[in-house]
Amino acid sequence: MSRRVLITAGASGIGRAMAKAFDAVGYDVWVTDIDEAALRSLPEHWTGHWADVASENDMSAILQAVQAEGGLDVLCANAGIAGPTEAVEDIELADWRRCVSINLDGAFLAAKHAAPLMKSVQAGSIILTSSTAGQYGYPNRAPYAAAKWAVIGLMKTLAMELGPHGIRANAICPGAVEGPRMEGVLEREAAAKGMTRDQVYDGYAAGTSMGRFVEGRDIANMAVFLASDSARLVSGQVIAVDGHTVNPDPKI
Protein backbone atom coordinates (compact mmCIF):
# COMPACT_ATOMS: atom_id res chain seq x y z
CA MET A 1 0.00 0.00 0.00
CA SER A 2 1.29 3.45 -0.90
CA ARG A 3 2.15 5.92 1.79
CA ARG A 4 0.38 9.27 1.69
CA VAL A 5 1.72 12.75 2.46
CA LEU A 6 -0.22 16.00 2.81
CA ILE A 7 1.74 19.22 2.28
CA THR A 8 0.18 22.60 2.99
CA ALA A 9 1.26 25.37 0.61
CA GLY A 10 2.54 22.55 -1.54
CA ALA A 11 1.95 23.98 -5.01
CA SER A 12 5.01 26.23 -5.11
CA GLY A 13 8.26 27.08 -3.35
CA ILE A 14 9.48 24.89 -0.50
CA GLY A 15 6.20 22.99 -0.45
CA ARG A 16 6.43 22.00 -4.09
CA ALA A 17 10.03 20.90 -3.58
CA MET A 18 8.78 18.71 -0.72
CA ALA A 19 6.03 17.29 -2.91
CA LYS A 20 8.52 16.40 -5.65
CA ALA A 21 10.84 14.74 -3.14
CA PHE A 22 8.08 12.63 -1.59
CA ASP A 23 6.78 11.71 -5.04
CA ALA A 24 10.28 10.54 -5.98
CA VAL A 25 10.31 8.02 -3.11
CA GLY A 26 6.87 6.64 -3.87
CA TYR A 27 4.38 8.62 -1.80
CA ASP A 28 0.89 9.54 -2.91
CA VAL A 29 1.11 13.32 -2.82
CA TRP A 30 -1.68 15.61 -1.67
CA VAL A 31 -1.19 19.34 -1.50
CA THR A 32 -3.22 22.34 -0.45
CA ASP A 33 -2.66 25.89 -1.60
CA ILE A 34 -4.48 29.17 -2.23
CA ASP A 35 -2.64 29.81 -5.50
CA GLU A 36 -5.08 28.56 -8.09
CA ALA A 37 -2.64 28.92 -10.99
CA ALA A 38 -0.01 26.89 -9.13
CA LEU A 39 -2.59 24.22 -8.30
CA ARG A 40 -3.50 23.93 -11.97
CA SER A 41 0.16 23.32 -12.80
CA LEU A 42 0.51 20.28 -10.53
CA PRO A 43 1.36 16.92 -12.06
CA GLU A 44 -1.78 14.95 -12.85
CA HIS A 45 -0.97 12.17 -10.40
CA TRP A 46 -0.85 14.58 -7.44
CA THR A 47 -4.04 15.56 -5.64
CA GLY A 48 -4.40 19.30 -5.18
CA HIS A 49 -7.03 21.20 -3.20
CA TRP A 50 -7.63 24.89 -2.63
CA ALA A 51 -7.63 25.44 1.13
CA ASP A 52 -7.04 28.28 3.53
CA VAL A 53 -4.87 26.82 6.28
CA ALA A 54 -6.25 29.33 8.78
CA SER A 55 -9.81 28.05 8.19
CA GLU A 56 -10.85 25.18 10.41
CA ASN A 57 -13.60 24.23 7.98
CA ASP A 58 -11.10 23.98 5.12
CA MET A 59 -8.56 21.96 7.08
CA SER A 60 -11.16 19.63 8.53
CA ALA A 61 -12.55 18.98 5.06
CA ILE A 62 -9.19 18.22 3.46
CA LEU A 63 -8.19 15.84 6.24
CA GLN A 64 -11.54 14.07 5.97
CA ALA A 65 -10.92 13.67 2.24
CA VAL A 66 -7.46 12.22 2.92
CA GLN A 67 -8.93 9.81 5.45
CA ALA A 68 -11.55 8.67 2.95
CA GLU A 69 -8.76 7.73 0.55
CA GLY A 70 -6.97 5.54 3.07
CA GLY A 71 -5.45 7.76 5.74
CA LEU A 72 -2.36 9.86 6.28
CA ASP A 73 1.22 8.83 6.94
CA VAL A 74 3.00 12.19 6.84
CA LEU A 75 1.87 15.76 7.39
CA CYS A 76 4.08 18.63 6.28
CA ALA A 77 2.52 21.77 7.78
CA ASN A 78 4.48 24.11 5.60
CA ALA A 79 2.22 27.10 4.90
CA GLY A 80 3.54 30.48 5.90
CA ILE A 81 3.85 34.12 4.92
CA ALA A 82 6.66 36.58 5.54
CA GLY A 83 4.48 39.26 7.10
CA PRO A 84 5.45 42.93 7.39
CA THR A 85 9.04 44.17 7.39
CA GLU A 86 8.74 47.11 9.76
CA ALA A 87 9.81 48.36 13.16
CA VAL A 88 7.57 46.94 15.86
CA GLU A 89 5.93 50.32 16.55
CA ASP A 90 4.88 50.61 12.91
CA ILE A 91 3.22 47.19 12.59
CA GLU A 92 -0.56 47.24 12.27
CA LEU A 93 -2.43 44.79 14.50
CA ALA A 94 -4.27 43.40 11.48
CA ASP A 95 -0.95 42.59 9.78
CA TRP A 96 0.34 40.98 12.97
CA ARG A 97 -2.75 38.82 13.27
CA ARG A 98 -2.68 37.72 9.63
CA CYS A 99 0.97 36.68 9.84
CA VAL A 100 0.45 34.75 13.07
CA SER A 101 -2.75 33.20 11.75
CA ILE A 102 -1.17 31.73 8.61
CA ASN A 103 2.10 30.65 10.21
CA LEU A 104 0.84 29.39 13.58
CA ASP A 105 -2.90 28.77 13.36
CA GLY A 106 -2.30 26.98 10.06
CA ALA A 107 0.19 24.58 11.65
CA PHE A 108 -2.10 24.02 14.63
CA LEU A 109 -5.19 23.29 12.54
CA ALA A 110 -3.33 20.89 10.25
CA ALA A 111 -1.92 19.01 13.24
CA LYS A 112 -5.26 19.05 15.08
CA HIS A 113 -7.08 17.35 12.24
CA ALA A 114 -4.23 15.03 11.26
CA ALA A 115 -3.68 13.68 14.77
CA PRO A 116 -6.85 11.55 14.94
CA LEU A 117 -6.04 9.95 11.59
CA MET A 118 -2.57 9.01 12.77
CA LYS A 119 -3.77 7.90 16.19
CA SER A 120 -6.16 5.48 14.53
CA VAL A 121 -3.19 3.55 13.13
CA GLN A 122 -0.74 4.39 15.94
CA ALA A 123 1.82 5.78 13.51
CA GLY A 124 2.71 8.93 11.63
CA SER A 125 5.14 11.79 11.15
CA ILE A 126 4.29 15.47 11.55
CA ILE A 127 6.81 17.93 10.13
CA LEU A 128 6.32 21.63 10.82
CA THR A 129 8.13 24.32 8.85
CA SER A 130 9.51 26.87 11.29
CA SER A 131 12.46 29.16 10.49
CA THR A 132 15.82 30.23 11.83
CA ALA A 133 13.82 33.31 12.85
CA GLY A 134 12.17 30.91 15.31
CA GLN A 135 15.56 30.23 16.87
CA TYR A 136 17.22 33.63 17.00
CA GLY A 137 14.61 36.35 16.55
CA TYR A 138 14.60 38.76 13.66
CA PRO A 139 14.75 42.58 13.63
CA ASN A 140 11.86 44.27 11.80
CA ARG A 141 9.99 40.95 11.50
CA ALA A 142 8.30 40.70 14.91
CA PRO A 143 5.12 38.80 13.92
CA TYR A 144 7.01 36.32 11.75
CA ALA A 145 9.62 35.58 14.40
CA ALA A 146 7.01 35.30 17.13
CA ALA A 147 4.92 32.87 15.08
CA LYS A 148 7.91 30.73 14.13
CA TRP A 149 9.05 30.50 17.76
CA ALA A 150 5.53 29.40 18.63
CA VAL A 151 5.60 26.75 15.91
CA ILE A 152 8.57 25.19 17.70
CA GLY A 153 6.66 25.20 20.99
CA LEU A 154 3.73 23.55 19.24
CA MET A 155 6.01 20.90 17.76
CA LYS A 156 7.62 20.11 21.12
CA THR A 157 4.17 19.67 22.64
CA LEU A 158 2.96 17.49 19.78
CA ALA A 159 6.00 15.24 20.16
CA MET A 160 5.25 14.74 23.86
CA GLU A 161 1.51 14.34 23.43
CA LEU A 162 1.51 12.09 20.38
CA GLY A 163 4.67 10.07 20.97
CA PRO A 164 2.82 7.42 23.02
CA HIS A 165 0.67 6.84 19.92
CA GLY A 166 3.66 6.15 17.68
CA ILE A 167 3.52 9.60 16.08
CA ARG A 168 6.66 11.68 15.70
CA ALA A 169 6.84 15.46 15.39
CA ASN A 170 9.78 17.59 14.29
CA ALA A 171 10.41 21.10 12.99
CA ILE A 172 12.62 22.17 10.13
CA CYS A 173 14.10 25.67 10.33
CA PRO A 174 15.04 26.92 6.88
CA GLY A 175 17.46 29.78 6.62
CA ALA A 176 17.42 32.11 3.62
CA VAL A 177 15.92 30.08 0.77
CA GLU A 178 16.39 31.01 -2.87
CA GLY A 179 13.08 31.85 -4.51
CA PRO A 180 10.36 34.43 -5.14
CA ARG A 181 9.24 34.73 -1.52
CA MET A 182 12.74 35.52 -0.34
CA GLU A 183 13.12 38.05 -3.13
CA GLY A 184 10.18 39.93 -1.66
CA VAL A 185 11.82 39.87 1.76
CA LEU A 186 15.08 41.15 0.31
CA GLU A 187 13.39 44.06 -1.43
CA ARG A 188 11.38 45.07 1.64
CA GLU A 189 14.35 44.75 3.96
CA ALA A 190 16.54 46.74 1.60
CA ALA A 191 13.97 49.55 1.64
CA ALA A 192 13.70 49.43 5.44
CA LYS A 193 17.49 49.53 5.91
CA GLY A 194 18.35 51.97 3.13
CA MET A 195 20.39 49.30 1.32
CA THR A 196 20.29 47.65 -2.08
CA ARG A 197 18.77 44.24 -2.65
CA ASP A 198 22.22 42.81 -3.43
CA GLN A 199 23.69 44.21 -0.22
CA VAL A 200 20.98 42.54 1.82
CA TYR A 201 21.43 39.28 -0.11
CA ASP A 202 25.18 39.31 0.50
CA GLY A 203 24.57 40.05 4.17
CA TYR A 204 22.32 37.02 4.55
CA ALA A 205 24.89 34.80 2.86
CA ALA A 206 27.70 36.23 5.01
CA GLY A 207 25.64 35.42 8.10
CA THR A 208 26.18 31.69 7.52
CA SER A 209 29.39 29.77 7.97
CA MET A 210 28.87 28.18 4.54
CA GLY A 211 28.35 31.58 2.90
CA ARG A 212 25.32 30.75 0.79
CA PHE A 213 21.55 30.52 0.59
CA VAL A 214 19.81 27.14 0.71
CA GLU A 215 17.44 25.76 -1.93
CA GLY A 216 14.00 24.24 -1.64
CA ARG A 217 15.40 20.80 -2.34
CA ASP A 218 17.59 21.03 0.77
CA ILE A 219 14.50 21.48 2.93
CA ALA A 220 12.65 18.77 1.01
CA ASN A 221 15.42 16.21 1.49
CA MET A 222 15.33 16.79 5.24
CA ALA A 223 11.56 16.35 5.28
CA VAL A 224 11.81 13.02 3.46
CA PHE A 225 14.45 11.86 5.92
CA LEU A 226 12.36 12.86 8.94
CA ALA A 227 9.41 10.94 7.51
CA SER A 228 11.47 7.82 6.86
CA ASP A 229 12.16 4.75 8.94
CA SER A 230 15.75 5.95 9.19
CA ALA A 231 14.43 8.62 11.55
CA ARG A 232 12.09 6.30 13.45
CA LEU A 233 13.27 7.56 16.84
CA VAL A 234 13.83 11.19 15.87
CA SER A 235 11.12 13.28 17.47
CA GLY A 236 10.80 16.63 19.21
CA GLN A 237 13.77 18.01 17.30
CA VAL A 238 14.44 21.43 15.81
CA ILE A 239 16.63 20.97 12.74
CA ALA A 240 18.06 23.98 10.94
CA VAL A 241 18.77 23.66 7.23
CA ASP A 242 20.50 26.98 6.77
CA GLY A 243 24.18 26.61 5.97
CA HIS A 244 24.83 27.19 9.70
CA THR A 245 23.64 30.60 10.81
CA VAL A 246 26.38 32.38 12.74
CA ASN A 247 24.89 35.89 12.63
CA PRO A 248 21.11 36.12 12.17
CA ASP A 249 21.21 39.87 11.43
CA PRO A 250 24.48 40.56 9.60
CA LYS A 251 25.43 44.13 8.85
CA ILE A 252 27.68 44.82 5.87
Image (spheres, grey):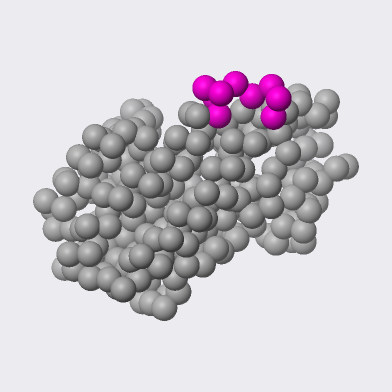
Which residue sits at x=30%, y=66%? 124
As drawn, 195 above or below 126: above
Q: Quadrant of residue 233?
A: bottom left
Residue 27 in view (yes/no): no
Q: Could you say where residue 216 lies in the image, as x and y percent from the top left?
A: 53, 51
> What residue do we see at 77% from left, 45% from top?
249
Segment colored magenta: 88-96
Q: Is residue 198 magenta?
A: no
If the image is split into quadrants, where does the C terminus sit?
A: top right
Q: Is residue 227 above or below residue 61?
A: below
Q: Please tell me whether residue 229 is drawn above or below residue 65 in the rendered image.
A: below
At horizontal 17% and vertical 64% (from top left) the residue drawn is 120
Q: Residue furthest left?
A: 68
Q: Position of residue 193 (x, y in %)?
A: 80, 29
Q: Position of residue 185 (x, y in %)?
A: 65, 33
The answer to whether residue 189 is above or below residue 94 is below
**Closer to the camera, 183 or 58?**
58
View extreme (right): residue = 252
